Image (cartoon, rainbow, N blue to C red):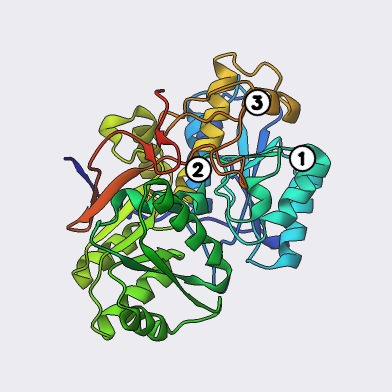
Amino acid sequence: MRRVRLSMAMGVTLVTLVALAGCSSGDSDDTSAGLTGEPVRIGVMAPIAGATLAFPDIPKIAKAAEHGINSRGGVKGRPIQIVVCDDKDEAGTAAQCANKLVNEDKVLFVTGTIGRQQATLLSALEAAKIPLFCNTPVVTQELTSQWSFPCGSARVAFSNVALVLDPAADRIGMAGFSTSAVTGDYIRAGLHALGRTTQVDNVLTDTTTTDWVPVATQLKANGDKAVVTALQESAAIQLMQAMKQVGLNIPVVSTTGTLGQQFLDQVQSNGLKATLLATYQLDGSKSARRQQMIDDAAKYASDIDDTISESTIATWLGPNLFAEAVNNGTITDISSAGIVKWLNSGPIDTGMSAPLDFTKPGPSPKEPRAVNVYALPCPVVDGELSATTDTFESALAGPAPKR
């Protein structure tokens, strides 16, 4: 069982954000030397510096993806440019971002998005017939729109909690914000699919909360035998600190959707038992694509803290899958329409996960675009993830199709 530590803090790289709507674009450097023609522009929108929701590593990994692809010859000799827009988790700013990406930057597709403002972005993309590819879906529209092609399943992935839950845990808590109530439904669906009758208690709090002691206290009062966290990393860490404060030591289960190395370090510090469900293969020795991502991050984004969360991986993966498909001749029409045709043509081997097949709906009837609902169980051991198997599996759909 190979352990993988996934922190990339090895230096300093500066990411400059342009004032308008918090947007940044790939800066030129020697990775694009020798490439000619109009840059192929790809967009990213996420809360980079939101007050209660922030993903500061997304622009760093976007930069790494851009420079990595360009260093390998770009897209048929043309450079790519990844434009990142910080929606700050604000509706008005998200509308500005969507307008800029579509009408000013004229991106071919948008990738790596995550956050609560994605409905605004998706509406603009649908109107312009621009695909959203390799997003980490949070809002319902991302899981239903024919213009959304997520590489992971985000909240649907919580159905896989049933795969790792101790059979003796007859009652568990789901800790999240008030907007996360649906996560409990996915946990129950996975349990039901496996014939489990475990009670799931939703323990929710306001999206602006910074005090997690009441949540930890409620989990303890419920007699919950484990807790599933549907939280961004900083909030999940605060919850674990609150659990320690109230004397609650129960197993923690979550997905790698928004959790990174700081979460793993906190698990170790608190002496907790934890398991994460990984959408992607995180061991570079078992995935050449994963190793390429690790190498790009080390070379072009050496100050990055997180290379394991689904949102960070998707931001790197989407542009790389696109570039490969163009360079190997799978995509012959470098346009938004050409990308949609490719995505709808059949299974796509990501090299890091179960195949993506958008020709048929996923197993969750209300979220047909969630086609990759598979995961690898990864216990946290000494601050590192240790996958117990290399076989992706789903509580809803069984073992993943072979790549």
Q: Mark 1, residues whose alpha carbon is within 10 Å: few (<14), some, or many (≥20)?
A: some
- Residue placed under numbered mark 3 in the picture: 344
Tell me the element at label 1.
loop
Identified by mark 2, the residue type is Gly
Residue 371 percent location from the top left of the image: 54, 37
In the rendered image, the vertical position of residue 188 relative to residue 217, given as above or below: above
* Mark 1 or 2, nearer chain start: 1
Q: Mark 3, residues whose alpha carbon is within 10 Å: few (<14), some, or many (≥20)?
A: some
- Residue placed under numbered mark 2 in the picture: 152
In the rendered image, the vertical position of residue 317 relative to residue 99, given as above or below: above
Identified by mark 1, the residue type is Lys
Identified by mark 3, the residue type is Asn
Residue 106: assigned label: 1
Q: Mark 2, residues whose alpha carbon is within 10 Å: few (<14), some, or many (≥20)?
A: many
296 horizontally vs 112: left or right? left
Tell me the element at label 3.
loop
Asked if the residues shown at circle 2 and circle 3 are in contact, with their CB atoms under 8 angstroms apart, the answer is: no
The residue at the point 58 percent across, 45 percent down is: 135
